[in-house]
Image (cartoon, coloured by chain):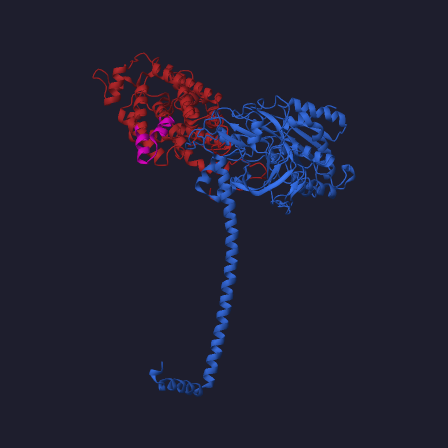
Chain colours: A blue, B red
Amino acid sequence: MSAPTFDLGYLHGGLRMPRRKDKSNKQPIAHVPVPQQLIIPITQHAGDPAHVVVGIGERVLKGQLIAESDGPISAPVHASSSGKVVAIEPWPVSRRLGGNAPCIVIECDGEDRAIELSEAITPFTSMDQETLFQKILQGGIVGLGGAVFPTAQKLMHASITPLEHLVLNGIECEPYITCDDMLMREQADEVLGGAQILMHALGVEHCFVAVESDKPEAIHAIADVMTELQDDRIAIKQIPTIYPSGAEDQTVQLVTNKEVPTGGLPTDVGCVVQNVGTSAAVYRWICRGEPLISRVTTVTGDGIAAPMNVFARIGTTVADIINFVGGYTENVHHLVIGGPMTGRSVTTDRVPLVKATNCILVMSDEEQFGNEQPCIRCGDCASVCPVQLLPQQLFWYACADDEEKLRSYGLMDCIECGCCDLVCPSHIPLTADFRMAKARMRELADEVARAERARLRYEFHTQRLDREQLLRAQQLEAQKQAAREGGSKAISDILERTSKKDDRDPGEE
Amino acid sequence: MEFARRDAPFIAPKANVASIMRQVLYALIPATIAYVWFFGTGLIFNMLIAVAFCIGGEASMMLARGKSIRVALGDFSAIVTAVILAFALPPLTPWWVTATAALFGIVVAKHLYGGLGFNIFNPAMAGYVVVLVAFPVHLNFWIAPRIGDLDYHYVTIFETLRYTLTGTLPDYLTIDAISRASPLDAVKSGLSTMHTFAEIHANPMMGDFGGRGWEWISNLIALGGIWLLLKKIIRWHIPLGVFAGLLVPSGLMYLIEAGNHASPGFYLFSGGTMLCAFFVATDPVSAATSPRGRFVYGVGIGFLIYAIRRWGSYADGVAFAVILMNMAVPAIDNLTRPRIVGHIRHEKTPGG
């Protein structure tokens, strides 16, 4: 079956840049063996932390639930191999705020014994929507494209809106990263199998598999499986090789030619976007009973001796993974978890692989960053911005901390893709500045909310005081009234009391 | 193992301000050579003096503001200002005129407004306008191009240098002997004395379009500008806007009444049109910011050039046109904001 072609939507700006993908996609995905120790963070998803359900010293099996979903947006966590829980303690992780986060540390026994499934695998076609959502939730499945939003909750939310398309995102537009490319090449059957499950869960009758045009092997593999499946609901859509075509809203724009409204979601234009890795994870859980305990990740960069893709257990430390692929080169500068445009740099390789880790990138000092110079308003940033913002103006207002202007110039629409940074002749860290300005604005919004609460409390407090004062005044008035009515008797009583006092002998004391 | 921290992205930008400014300078090399061929070495002396005072002004202002001098001089922006200023001045200009323009441009128009990136006015044009008003005699002293009329006198390096340094010519040479009206002057005064454009243009000095010599300098400036366009140092919106703003009204007027109006071609290739379209109006700092805004800004400049040349009291109107449109930039920016993706249309902010 040949892939039907559709008209592509329009994407403003974007960057064509060195892809540097051929470093890591030349050999098959390798399997990292069970490490001695697994460090499994209890928060590997957007939303509320999972609730730990194992104790220190407890023996766990591969696939066993160790922390359960806790809250309206949350996902459970499973043990990625068998062994003993030796600690539940803070450990360095890669996250926006940096620092440490609570992790379950498992000393592996090396046997890698899997837990027996509590229920038999039933074909997904016999499950209704609600059962399927619950089932997906139990698998600990989160969006593997980077946002790690719990998949079940994303699907549940989507299922209440009218939907047209499921979009499987295999675009992978960021340089260096090839884990989705390799997954599609080697496990296209799982990817499309997952797509069928997701379509069934959502009740949509159409699925686009969006793949960037620079991945002919992946497109070929997907097309082959499509021929086998004979499922004409699924179509491949080739996306031009331009960064950031794989960002969720931009993908929707390219695939459907519809813009996701500001502050909205792809569901607002009838789309649900799922990463191809997520789709494969759904397939493995629903059809094989394997929860999300491992993933493909790209280990690459000039700081890596032999870049490649690996299949590793969640909780394996980056150090273990890098050792497995042959270690570092001489020239090592930054360790980045994620891609070179949106990833986060960490200071230690003791951080564990988590569900979000699509790439472990070790940069050499080949990239030379100049000093920041004044903005000359050349406007190159505006011409590459995929959201058609004016970064030069935003920068100006961010410096001035002008919240109103920042809002009206769309700071909150910034997707932090980093395109503007890359073309800036003045080497201004625009994206970092915008990230900071956004954080400040959110903080400010929090402050406003807090101030509002404080104001209400204060008003309540003053009202109460006023009421009490009024009450006291009334009582006083009543007493005065009583005193006036009591008249001379009261006065004579007082005089009597004081004269008695005067009679006392001072020596008594 | 431990690693250094940094914020994403981890790929370094390739462009830098200094290389942009250097390429702007390279783009003016052909025009410089042509200028020197037609009008002698005056341009070079003006450039040297302007560069010296621009750099001096920049360095002292950076020092006064407690900032790094090396960074400011390393970006070549002061040199670009100096070179553009030198192109705007007549070839024979006394050094103090050039110095006044350079210092005003750098010290007042650039640094008192906050330095590179913050100046509202184009520094070169601000400096030029000041000396145009302060030294009208010097600024209207144009000489004949090399292939001019019969009694053409070639001004030697020594004569040029002497005039530049002292403001006087040797005894054997009077100002009247070498001074000529510029083509723009000639057309302006000719039209005002009831000559038709055809009559004025019949003078061989007027060349094909913009005046002998002048039009060739314009051609080479345009060549440099096109090179900058191809190198993506500048974008097409402003130059095209300037041309449209100038050619549409001048073309219409010429069509309606060819005798009383100069041809659009004349306006395009004479005076500072090309320099303005490719090198002055395209100064990003003082220009509008969005592509649409830049086109509007260019149209405004083009139209004002035409209006001043045709109806104003100055022969050329480039500097005033640029300065006036510089003032309009905040309004243009506010009215030409692109629609943000995902928004129905942007909300206008009151007050600008």
Seen from this angle, which residue lies furthest left?
A: B171
Q: Give the left or right position of residue A16, taking residue A273 as reference.
A: left
Instruction: Look at the image and give the residue range highlighted in magenta.
Output: B56-78
Count of numbered tags: 0
Say which of B85 and B200 sits in front: B85
Toward which corner of the image does residue A114 lie, by quadrant?
A: top right
Say which of A397 and B148 sits in front: A397
The stretch drawn in magenta includes residue B74: yes
Seen from this angle, which residue lies furthest right?
A: A126
Is residue B122 visible in the rendered image? The answer is yes
State the image coordinates of residue A29 (x, y, percent, origin top left): 64, 25
State the image coordinates of residue A4 (x, y, percent, origin top left): 71, 26
Q: Is residue B159 above or below residue B59?
A: above
Q: Residue at x 44, y 85 (%)?
A: A490
Is residue A265 visible in the rendered image? The answer is no
State the image coordinates of residue A157 (x, y, percent, origin top left): 67, 43
Toward which corner of the image does residue A279 lie, by quadrant?
A: top right
Say which of B19 and A383 sits in front: B19
State the image coordinates of residue A113 (x, y, percent, origin top left): 69, 35
The stretch drawn in magenta includes residue A1: no
Magenta region's main secondary structure?
helix
Q: Is residue B146 above or below residue A452?
A: above
